[in-house]
Image (spheres, rainbow, N blue to C red):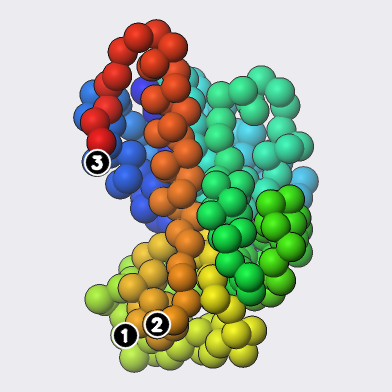
Amino acid sequence: MIGVFDSGVGGLASARVLRSRLKAENIIYLADRKNAPYGTKSKEELISLVSNDILRLKNYGCRICLIACCTASSVYEHLDNELKKISLPIIEPAALLASRGRKIAVIATEHTVESSIFKQKIAYFSKAEVAQICAQELVSLVESGEHDGNLTEKGYKTVFNVSQKIKSANPDTLVLGCTHFSHLEKTLSALLPRVKIVNSAKEGAIALLSEIQAEKMERGVCLYTE
Ligand code: DGL
């Protein structure tokens, strides 16, 4: 069984990718709504919440957990080794893909922006310029049920305002550095037609699929199809 978790509905975007590709696996999704939002929590609070999430999924029988939340993934290095072994963070896959750009904007939660984790990871791969933009307000928007194709006038204005901040950084690449923002990808893409969008939820899921593929190949079986 595979576990996927987030503070709310954001990580469902990762779970959907996994569901469509892993026909023979059971997937369990944990939304820690009781403690949401994660983006306004301190590093210490996040370490404790993320550790509990992984342990809960392990107790449900998961052998591996996708941390389908960039905020939660930002504290991965601070987790116990045993928890690290059975979980996969999602920052690096998105940072790697984004690093092909020259001017990158990252929209993320308060905590993720403060941690500068995307900036650090992108710097590992390239010398691209990185602008970080906090868009915590989009988390509550998505949690309230609004998403692409379902935005109220007020909701659209909120996304539009974030797009204006992104525009002023003049990026060629935009990282959706919070999985909740995957649910607004089409709207952001229409507002920023010349910007390549990197979706952290999707890239994280693809990274987990590669891990599973490698694991199966070691055992000489292939359980998911292209
Ligand atoms: N979906 C989460 C992320 O990727 C965070 C949302 C929250 O603030 O709870 O960062």
Percent from the top left, x then y, of residue 186?
A: 33, 73
Query: Which residue has dot 2 on it?
Result: 193
Q: Which amino acid does label 2 sit on?
A: Pro
Q: What element carries label 3?
A: helix
Image position of 107 (left or right of 148): right
| Relative height, residue 168 to residue 112 (above, below) | below
Q: What element carries label 2?
A: loop
User: Mark 1–mark 2 contact, CB under 8 Å?
Assistant: no
Image position of 1 (left or right of 181): left
Considering every residue shown, the one lying at the far top of the view is: 219
Percent from the top left, x then y, of residue 194?
A: 44, 81
> Which residue is depicted at the point 53% across and 41% down?
67
User: Which callout, 1 or 2, points to the residue nearer the camera?
Assistant: 2
Q: Which of marks 2 and 3 is nearer the N terminus?
A: 3
Q: Please tell me the numbered disc located at residue 152.
A: 1
Q: Which amino acid does label 1 sit on?
A: Thr
Q: Please tell me the numbered disc located at residue 20.
A: 3
Q: Which of 60 and 107 is in front in this view?
A: 107
